[in-house]
Image: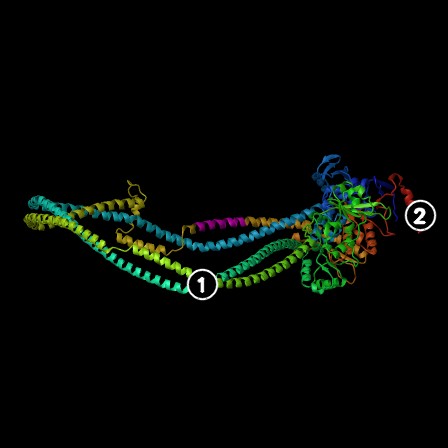
């Protein structure tokens, strides 16, 4: 490699385990630096560096070094030192991860060129709490102040057009046209360009909102006006109806007053008629007085006689009651005699029945004695009955024995059934856990789940063993082990199907991948099983470091699956340790044969350099398990299934034995029934004589009892006769008392008749006088009734007048002592004066008012309210129209200030971009793309490229071009921006990795030509390697990053000697 230098200068770093050196070249003075360019980068305890100071040049800075030496660490230092987020770098998300391992803190210090005094930013990073301490120009500061200072220098580390770290190179091609435009505006456009663009987008959004608002309000106002016109007719009809209702109200007010006046006149007439009737009634009463007095005298005489008649009537009634009582007593005595005779008849019938029973009992005894004589001739059956009893006892013992066996078998069957149910529940629990695993697989990779269903339905297509996805077959022994297994085995293999035979795998992939178009992975197990391979070191020899198991011992899997994992991922040789291992990690990694190991939360990979034979370690966090934390004991499941089958066989055997015993019981029951029937017959024969003797004895006892209790009819008849004689004696005394009361009643009746004859004479005289007064009394009564009616009429009319007067004042809203106002009297004069005319007019006005249906005062209120709303809408619409015109004017002004410079900027970029591509015998162009000129948030920069003469220009996307073509396009676009020189520096990290040698050489030449011009800003180009015989410029600064145990210390580095040797070597070639 050749390098042209004016004044060589060394940049150094020192590390306790490594030595880093950098060779740099830069012009003296800072006059060629753009404001915001980086003058110095100091890193201490940062990533790979103990201490390093970098002095970049003002133009192109080539940072070259092997992978892992620390080139990207400089990029990280630039980003984090200028207040960039860790997400920009695409590495660790915590800033503490950027401190060198083993250190508690580190710092970055960046010096930026600025006219009037450079800016020095110092950031100290603490591992413990991931916090940073900031200093600006030697004074304590905060991140926000640093961000503002960086922004003022037009530095944008979040803009991919200015800062493109290694992990973000691929994202440039994924940027949308809109994102690329915004990044370009921020990077090379004037500061006001992006501001104008944002204003235009905001103005357009507000304009669209105003347009929609104006459109909505115009539409609403038109509808409101149409409704207003429709309601106007209703309002006129409402007022017409209100006029009729006002007339009705006046008529209703006048009507009580007219009714009051008519009623008052009627009251005066009623008073006059009443007074005249009272005079007539007084004259008639004076003519009737003498006859009425004489009638009163007769009434005075009749009153004592009536009292005596009433007394005699009461005495007669009392005597009649006593006679009735005596008659009732006589009837009771007659009934008593009849009851006594009835008792005698019953006793006679009972004696006859008793004689019949005695005769029947004697006859039965004779018959039983005859039958007993016949039975005495039969032989004795007792020996036969005893033999049958012996056989019955043996049958019962045999049955009891069989029932005991059956009970034992039933208990055993119940126990086996309970055990079977318990095993079934355990199997179901395991199946549910497997289903949960399958659901996780379906959620993460649906194609694999679909292929799994296909496999289960088509297993007969395969010859050898075929295993479902590995994540379903692996069963960790403890859920806490799952995270190590998942971290060690990638998900692409966890979802892979494992085949014992390769031809089965090819058949599966043909059916599933080619025919069903499913994206699945499959694995063929090694021909020779590796599942039992021994680890390099016994785990006992590693326990002193905290290791307690190899990864293979943490899970179970089928032999083919385990063989693949041992062969591919050496799970039999990966130890797992605890926190003690973490504490002793420096000692642990020195142990031979340990290539991968795990602590409680980290994975360590140990490699040995082929050059220096030194250990190179890397570590990463162990992520929580997502799939394998659901554990199912496969051996336990298989054992449970075998136990289930054994239980089923045992249950069938028990059932068969129970059925055999039941058949034996049936035979014994049949024999038992036969013996019982025979025993019953013999017992009947043996017991018949005894039964007959018992019956004869019982009947004789019954006969003696009946003979002892024979009824004595003569004695009963004598008692009945004496009782009837006593009752007849009582009847004689009752009849004597009855006759005395009858005589008393007859005497009182005669005395009552004499008094009634006296009363008849006086009554006739009174009737004659009353007949004489009847004609005058009739006239008097009619006159009196007339007076009463007239009085009632007068009271009624008086109350009616008061009510009508009160009602009239109430309707007119007058106080009780207030008279009708003059205006109301004038209004009443225009209305009819009679009730008939008022009622007729009321009916007419009601009919007219009822013709205006569906109208209310709300119609008028709504009409007036809408009229006011229309006025307000017209004013609001006028204001919004003015605001819309103002926005449109602002948009036009901002568009003119933004679009024309933007078009010029894009055209300049296009010219440079096209020239670069043309120099590479390719074609490329950049244009401003939009589908609608008024949609400012849709504007974007479109990059179209063509790398082959036979193809057309195609838009740059993440899929159409190859990785190298995307890298070339990205690099040339950034170089096209470089000459516009509005950002102080650009950083591009390892963008040339995907390029072919031809394109890499061409791009390198373009970078050198463009970035080394005096008009361009600072440029950082990071690469691990360069092609030979490249062209270099004096304006370049080349930073060599060396890292390794055999590096010379900085004080022994001789730059001149290195250059002499390089020139000498070049001259020889």
The disc at residue 737 is: none
Q: Is residue 383 left or right of residue 1054?
A: left
The percent position of residue 112, horizontal first and vertical second, equals 77, 40
The span picked out in magenta is 861-877
* Camera-side mark, 2 or 1: 1
Secondary element at tag 2: helix
Crowd around label 1: few <14 · some 14–19 · many ≥20 (10 Å): some
Q: Quadrant of residue 406?
A: bottom right
Task: Report the residue at 89% width, 42% height from top.
Answer: 1055
Q: Quadrant of residue 964?
A: bottom right
Q: Quadrant of residue 423?
A: bottom right
Residue that mark 2 sits on: 1064
The disc at residue 685 is: 1
Q: In terms of sequence position, does the residue under pointer 2 or pointer 1 come before the other?
A: 1
Label the magenta part by its dominant secondary structure.
helix
The percent position of residue 363, horizontal first and vertical second, equals 33, 63
Task: Report the residue at 41% width, 64% height from top.
Answer: 375
Q: Is residue 1031 visible?
A: yes
Q: Is 868 within the magenta?
A: yes
């Amino acid at each position: 490699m050749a390098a042209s230098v004016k004044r060589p200068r060394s940049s150094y770093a020192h590390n306790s385990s490594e030595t880093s050196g950098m060779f740099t070249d830069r012009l003296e003075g800072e006059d060629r630096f753009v404001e915001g360019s980086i003058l110095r980068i100091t890193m201490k305890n940062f990533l790979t560096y103990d201490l390093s100071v970098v002095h970049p040049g003002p133009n192109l800075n080539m940072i070259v070094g092997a992978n892992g030496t620390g080139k990207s660490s400089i990029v990280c230092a630039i980003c984090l030192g200028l207040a960039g987020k860790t997400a920009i770098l695409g590495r660790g998300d915590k800033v503490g991860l950027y401190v060198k391992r083993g250190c508690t803190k580190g710092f970055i210090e960046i010096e930026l060129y600025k006219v009037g005094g450079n800016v020095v930013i110092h950031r100290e990073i603490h591992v413990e709490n991931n916090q940073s301490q900031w200093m600006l120009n030697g004074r304590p500061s905060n991140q926000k102040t640093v961000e503002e200072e960086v922004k003022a220098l037009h530095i944008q580390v979040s803009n991919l057009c200015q800062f493109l770290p290694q992990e973000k190179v691929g994202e440039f091609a994924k940027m949308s046209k809109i994102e690329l435009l915004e990044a370009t505006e921020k990077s090379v456009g004037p500061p006001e360009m992006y501001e104008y663009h944002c204003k235009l987008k905001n103005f357009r959004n507000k304009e669209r909102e105003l347009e929609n608002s104006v459109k909505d309000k115009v539409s609403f106002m038109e509808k409101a006006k149409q409704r207003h016109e429709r309601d106007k007719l209703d309002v006129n009809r409402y007022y017409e109806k209100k006029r009729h209702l006002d007339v009705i109200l006046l008529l209703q007010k006048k009507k009580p007053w007219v009714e009051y006046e008519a009623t008052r006149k009627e009251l005066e007439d009623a008073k006059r008629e009443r007074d005249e009737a009272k005079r007539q009634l007084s004259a008639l009463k004076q003519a009737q007085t003498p006859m009425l007095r004489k009638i009163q005298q007769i009434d005075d005489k009749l009153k004592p006689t009536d009292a005596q008649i009433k007394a005699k009537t009461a005495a007669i009634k009392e005597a009649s009651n006593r006679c009735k009582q005596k008659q009732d007593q006589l009837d009771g005595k007659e009934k008593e005699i009849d009851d006594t005779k009835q008792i005698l008849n019953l006793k006679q019938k009972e004696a006859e029945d008793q004689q019949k029973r005695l005769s029947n009992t004697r006859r039965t005894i004779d018959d039983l004695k005859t039958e007993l004589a016949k039975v005495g001739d039969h032989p004795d059956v007792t020996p036969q009955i005893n033999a049958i009893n012996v056989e019955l006892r043996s049958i019962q013992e045999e049955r009891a024995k069989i029932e005991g066996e059956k009970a034992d078998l039933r208990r055993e069957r119940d126990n086996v059934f309970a055990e079977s149910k318990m095993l079934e529940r355990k199997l179901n629990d395991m199946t549910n856990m497997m289903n949960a695993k399958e659901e996780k697989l379906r959620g993460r990779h649906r194609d694999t789940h679909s292929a799994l269903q296909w496999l289960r339905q088509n297993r007969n297509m395969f010859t050898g063993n075929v295993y479902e996805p590995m994540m379903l077959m692996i069963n960790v022994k403890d859920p806490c082990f799952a995270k190590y297994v998942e971290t060690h085995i990638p998900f692409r293999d966890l979802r892979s199907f494992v085949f014992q035979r390769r031809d089965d795998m090819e058949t599966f992939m043909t059916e599933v991948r080619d025919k069903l178009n499913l994206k699945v992975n499959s694995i063929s197990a090694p021909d020779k099983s590796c599942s039992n391979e021994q680890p390099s070191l016994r785990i006992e020899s590693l326990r002193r470091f905290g290791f307690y198991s190899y990864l293979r011992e943490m899970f179970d899997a089928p032999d083919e699956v385990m063989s693949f994992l041992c062969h591919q991922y050496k799970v039999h040789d990966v130890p797992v340790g605890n926190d003690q291992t973490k504490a002793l990690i420096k000692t642990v990694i020195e142990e031979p044969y340990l290539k991968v190991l795990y602590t409680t939360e980290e994975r360590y990979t140990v490699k040995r350099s082929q050059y220096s034979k030194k250990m190179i370690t890397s570590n990463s966090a162990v992520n929580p398990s997502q799939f394998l934390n659901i554990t199912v004991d496969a051996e336990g499941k298989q054992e449970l299934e075998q136990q289930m089958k054994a239980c089923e066989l045992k249950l069938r055997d028990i059932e068969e034995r129970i059925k055999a015993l039941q058949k034996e019981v049936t035979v014994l029951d049949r024999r038992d029934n036969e013996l019982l029937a025979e025993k019953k017959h013999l017992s009947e024969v043996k017991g018949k004589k005894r039964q007959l003797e018992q019956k004869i004895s019982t009947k004789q006892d019954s006969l003696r009892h009946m003979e002892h209790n024979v009824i004595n009819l003569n004695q009963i008849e004598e008692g009945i006769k004496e009782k009837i004689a006593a009752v007849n004696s009582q009847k004689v005394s009752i009849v004597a008392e009855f006759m005395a009361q009858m005589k008393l009643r007859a005497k009182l009746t005669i005395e009552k008749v004499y008094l009634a004859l006296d009363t008849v004479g006086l009554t006739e005289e009174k009737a004659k006088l009353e007949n004489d007064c009847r004609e005058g009394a009739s006239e008097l009564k009619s006159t009196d009734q007339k007076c009463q009616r007239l009085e009632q009429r007068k009271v009624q009319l008086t109350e009616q007048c008061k009510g009508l007067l009160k009602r009239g004042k109430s309707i007119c809203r007058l106080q009780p002592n207030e008279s009708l106002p003059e205006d109301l009297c004038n209004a009443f004069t225009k209305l009819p004066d009679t009730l008939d005319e008022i009622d007729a007019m009321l009916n007419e006005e009601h009919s007219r008012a009822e013709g205006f249906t569906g109208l209310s005062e709300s119609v008028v209120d709504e009409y007036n309210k809408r009229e006011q709303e229309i006025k307000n809408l017209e004013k609001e619409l006028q204001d919004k129209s003015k605001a819309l015109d103002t926005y449109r004017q602002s948009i036009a002004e901002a568009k003119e200030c933004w679009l024309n410079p933007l078009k010029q900027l894009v055209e300049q970029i296009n010219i440079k971009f096209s020239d670069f591509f043309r120099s590479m015998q390719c074609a490329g162009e950049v244009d401003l793309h939009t589908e609608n000129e008024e949609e400012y948030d849709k504007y974007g920069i479109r990059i179209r490229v063509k790398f082959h003469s036979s193809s057309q220009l195609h838009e740059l996307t993440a899929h159409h071009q190859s990785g190298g073509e995307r890298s070339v396009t990205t690099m040339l676009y950034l170089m096209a921006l470089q000459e516009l020189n509005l950002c102080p520096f650009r950083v591009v990290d390892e963008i040339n990795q995907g390029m072919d040698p031809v394109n890499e050489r061409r791009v390198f030449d373009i970078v050198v030509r463009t970035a080394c011009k005096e008009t361009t800003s600072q440029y950082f180009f990071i690469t691990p390697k360069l092609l030979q015989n490249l062209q270099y410029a004096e304006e370049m600064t080349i930073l060599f990053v060396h890292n390794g145990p055999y590096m010379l210390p900085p004080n022994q580095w001789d730059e001149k000697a290195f250059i002499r040797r390089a020139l000498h070597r070049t001259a020889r070639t």
